[in-house]
Structure formats: structure tokens, C-alpha cells
Amino acid sequence: MPDTKQLLEEKLDLLFECMISPRHQGNWGMDMDHWDWVPGVGLISILDYGTAGGQDKAMNYLLQWVERNKQKAEGVKVINSMAPYAVFPELFRRTGDEWFLHKAQETAAWMLEDAPRTREGALEHTVTEAALFPEQVWADTVYMAVLFLARLASLTGDRGMAEAALQQTLLHLRLLQDPETGLLFHGWNCREGSHMSAVRWARANAWITLAVPQIVAGIKGLVPVPEELYSRYSELASALRSCQGTGGLWHTVLDRQDYYQETSGSAGIACGFIQGVRHGMLEPSYLGSVRVTLEGILPLIQDNGEVQGVSGGTPVMPSEEAYNKIALFPSLYGQGLVMQLLAQALNLDLDLGLGLGR
């Protein structure tokens, strides 16, 4: 059996080289050089890769990326485009460059003061595409925007910002969590008072499962975190563990075992389990589910570094069946969520017992 650490390192290097390759220019799902959520998830993931593996090349790439793309951020003020800013607090820590801090604070001020809200006070999910979702709350927002607020609050010690991150996290959990199953619906329409198609979509659950432990870790020294958040997260994780599919992956609609299994959501959920264990929100037994997911996902990383089985960009769809018809193709968020899973597994420094050949 190959050494687990060596195997993970080799796969991480493949993922990284694929993500930064210039061959993807103009490809919506794989082109790093634009300012939106897709490359934003890629950046967050490359930061994880660099931090977990001590990879200077990853940190250097992040700095180069910002230099190349920072002008593209001007005038892009939507929730989905906040994702790239999540790396700014750490880049400021490492470089001392005040520009990162100033830009992050300026962007956070827009989120807190001017970003559209629903009648409940939740951030409305706004996007760069020519589409409007008035008074809609999506699970995606917690990862794309609230995680950034928590990281910046942790850096600056801003209690008001930490409180805002906490309240947004709680609001999203309250509005999206299904009281019957513990799973999350993809979205909530405040105007209609409904979950629209009421689908428990895997990647929506992944965004929140992955983000919440990191948000809590960033703010708990600044504001008290209520028991409600811990209990809701525990209920979510338990529900997810109970519907994990054969082979370690989750189905794109979590409670439809006849639908295809989806890689990015599965990686995000499993990585969220690691984060939950690391930050004391989940029992170590959840690492058993992580091991099975890793065994299922590693063979899906091709020799050229592309990850198979990743569903395309997905708004709230009109029916369960529509989610199962979303096309599969490589994307930076798929690459990234798998990268985060492998990086966090590497960082555990545990032999997960992967029964895999190389």
C-alpha cells in the first residue's frame, strides 16, 4: 500500500498544476483569471494547499493572481464575487502589505452597509451573471461571503464584524434547515415564504458544512457563539452522514439515491467533517466517513489533474429532476473542494488507511 501522505501530496500537486494551467483560458469553469466565485473557490483552496503543505509556490501564485486581476474587481459588487477576498486576511498577515487590509475592509463595509438584504436581514444572493434573485437566500452565500467576514474579523479583532458573521450564519441555518431531516434546502424565497423547489442539494449542504467550523473558529474569541449554532451544525452533520452513498460519495440530491453521485459536494462535505472535528464541533468518529470519501474521490483525479464527476454551476432549479440533469464537467470549484479535502486530510497527519494503489 502506498504511503498515504505521499499519495495525497502527489494528487495535490496534480490538482494545483491543472488549476493554474494557461490552457484553460476562456473556459468558464476552469479559467482562473476573472473575478468571481469560481476562481474565488480556487484561490481559497490554493491557500489551503499552501498552508497545509508549506508550499511557497502556492503563496507566490496567490500574490501573482491578485496583481493580475485586482483591476477586474473594481465595480463588481455582488455577493458571489466576494469569494476571492477570503484570502486577503492571510495575504496581509504574510506580506504586511496594507493594500490587502484596506481593500478587505472597504469590501466588508459594502457588505455590511449596502449589500441587499431580505426582509429577515439575510444577505440576498446576488451574482455577476445577468440574473436577479430578489429576496432569495442561498446556502452558497455562507461560503462565498460570510467566511470572508469571519476571517477579516479574526484578523482585525472587529467585534461588530464578528457579530455580523455570526448572525448571517444563524439566519441562513434557520431559513434553510429542514426540521424533518436536518439537511439544508438549497434556497429560501423570502417574498414567497417558501424553499421554492425544496431540494436538498449536495453542494449547497457542502458550502455550509465546510464554512461553519471555520467561521466559528474565526469569531468565537470575539463574540459568544450560541448553543443553537452548534446544535444545528451537529444535526446537519448527522443527517449528512446517514445519507452518504455507497463508495463514499453523496448523491447530487441527497435523499435521491437513484440520482448521480457528485464529486464537489462530496469533497466539501467530507472536508467540512474534518474542519468540524478539528474545531471541536464534531466527534472524531466522523473521520471514518472522510476516509471512505477519500477512497471514492482519489480515483476521480485524472493523470492531467482534472477532477471528474463535478456538476456545473447550479442556481435553485425548478425541480429535483432538474438537478439530476445538470451537466458534469471540470471546474475550479470542483478542483478546489477536492484540493481542500486532500489538504486537510494531509494536515491531520493521520493514516486514514487508504486501500489504494497509485
Image (spheres, grey):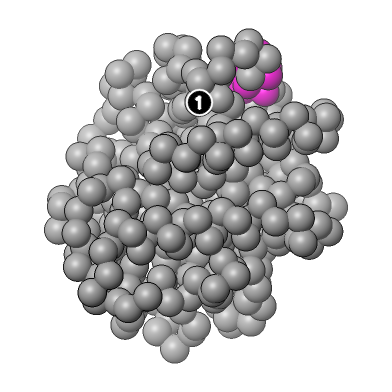
- Residue 230: where, in percent of width, then height? 26, 41
The residue tagged 1 is 90
Where on the picture, by quarter, is residue 11? bottom left
User: Which residue appears at 54% of the width and 73% of the height?
Assistant: 303
Vertical order, 143 against 288 (above or below)? above
Quadrant location, the C terminus: bottom left
Dominant secondary structure of the residues highlighted in magenta in the image: helix
- How would you rate the neighbour count of disc 1 (Cα within 10 Å): few for under 14, some for 14-19, many for 20 or more? some
Vertical order, 91 against 263 (above or below)? above
Q: Is residue 233 visible?
A: no
Left or right relative to 74: residue 192 = left
Quadrant location, the N terminus: bottom left
What span is colored magenta in the figure?
A: 101-108
**Pick the front one: 199 or 280:** 280
- Tell me which amino acid carries mark 1: Glu
**Pick the front one: 85 or 163:** 85
- Residue 175: where, in percent of width, then height? 46, 48
196 within the magenta span: no
- Residue 240: where, in percent of width, then height? 32, 64
**Pick the front one: 116 or 42:** 42
User: Which residue appears at 76% of the width and 61% of the height?
Assistant: 24
